[in-house]
């Protein structure tokens, strides 16, 4: 009896397991966490390079409520790639005086640093090197060949 039930059970459960894996989002953001040593909040941005990938790649989204050393304010979240060890882009928060309403609506208002100005340390990046966000520009998910646009970060803040 067990020999018959086990294969039957596998046939019933396997499609549900595969379906659940297929329903995983291709991009997602984790909950906010706080790094007390460095004084910033962060969350993971996780993505699949290909839609059928089993595992996620990730980058970090950094948020500084206020930092008097560099005058970093709460108007932006910054994207950090742990593979290249560089900050490469930023997206406005709902606090931003010019772009806040657009950020709340999830509009595409990304500012991507030119490669020569990317750095591991956000403090080493001069504010003048950040380009004004072009209208309706969104970077693609890193490493994709299908040009999938990067999902805008959620409007929630810690």
Image: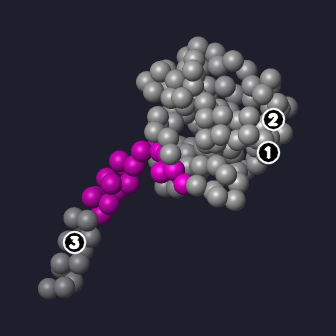
Q: From the viewer's side, name the closer residue of 49 and 98.
A: 98
* Residue under numbered circle 1: 121
- Residue 142 appears in the picture as rendered: no
* Residue under numbered circle 3: 9
Residue at point 59% right, 49% down?
42
Residue at point 70% right, 41% down?
67
Q: How is the image coloured?
A: one colour
For this orientation, the residue located farthest to the front is: 68
Crowd tier of the residue under label 2, counting other residues whose Cα lies within 10 Å: few below 14, some 14–19, many 20 or above: some
Position of 17 relative to 30 (above/below): below
**What quarter of the picture does the N terminus occupy?**
bottom left
Looking at the image, tell me whether mark 2 or mark 3 is earlier in sequence order: 3
Position of 66 relative to 16 (above/below): above
User: Where residue 38 sits in the image (x, y, percent)?
Assistant: 70, 54
Q: Is residue 21 magenta?
A: yes
Residue 125: assigned label: 2
User: Where residue 93 sits in the image (x, y, percent)?
Assistant: 55, 31
């Amino acid at each position: 009896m067990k020999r018959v039930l086990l294969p039957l059970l596998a046939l019933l459960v396997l499609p549900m397991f595969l379906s659940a894996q297929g329903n995983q989002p291709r991009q997602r953001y984790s909950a906010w966490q706080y790094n007390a040593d460095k004084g910033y909040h962060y969350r993971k941005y996780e993505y699949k390079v290909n839609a059928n990938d089993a595992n996620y790649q990730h980058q970090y989204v950094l948020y500084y409520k206020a930092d008097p050393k560099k005058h970093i304010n709460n108007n932006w979240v910054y994207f950090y790639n742990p593979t290249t060890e560089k900050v490469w882009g930023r997206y406005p928060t709902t606090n931003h005086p010019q772009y806040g309403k657009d950020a709340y609506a999830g509009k595409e208002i990304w500012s991507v640093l030119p490669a020569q100005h990317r750095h591991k340390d956000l403090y080493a990046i001069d504010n003048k090197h950040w380009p004004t966000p072009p209208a309706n520009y969104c970077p693609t998910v890193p490493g994709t060949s299908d040009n999938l646009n990067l999902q805008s970060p959620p409007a929630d803040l810690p």
